[in-house]
Amino acid sequence: MPRTTPSRPPAAPPTPHAPQIDLFPVLPAVEVLEARALAGPRTGVAHLVRVRWNPEPVPHLVFHDRHGWYCQEHGPACRAVPVAQEAVA
Ligand SMILES: [Zn+2]
């Protein structure tokens, strides 16, 4: 006998044009990654954080290792760096 699956509508998509977009800073999506799982146990990377601002398609990959904090793409001056530092604090 087949199981009846409740037909629930998918979650509503985010509003594409929020009216207050200029008044409030856009919060990035922050994901703290397992540095050792991704880069290996001997890599020396203490933290690895992915930061993405909508609607930017490319996330910033922020590393924290013996060189300090830096974005893979933009270096230590990237605006994703302080966001990543706060995420792991
Ligand atoms: Zn960056």
Image: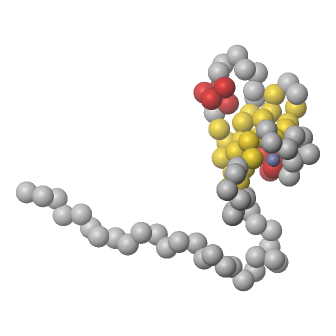
Residue shown at 34% from the left, 70% from the top:
8
Q: Quadrant of residue 72?
A: top right
Query: Which residue extends farthest bottom?
Result: 19
Image coordinates of residue 81 in percent, x first then y, are: 83, 45
Indicate left or right for 78 with 49 as reference: right
Indicate left or right for 23 with 16 as reference: right
Q: How many marks are shown on the rendered structure? A: 0
Image coordinates of residue 31 in percent, x first then y, are: 66, 47
Instruction: For residue 65, say whether it is visible.
Output: yes
- Colour scheme used in the picture? secondary structure
**Quadrant (top left/top right/bottom left/bottom right) for the C terminus:** top right
Residue shown at 87% from the left, 48% from the top:
78
Instruction: For residue 87, say whether it is visible.
Output: no
Q: Quadrant of residue 85?
A: top right
Residue shown at 85% from the left, 24% from the top:
66
53 versus 15 height, above or below: above
Image coordinates of residue 6 in percent, x first then y, are: 27, 67
Image coordinates of residue 54 in percent, x first then y, are: 69, 62
**Quadrant (top left/top right/bottom left/bottom right) for the N terminus:** bottom left
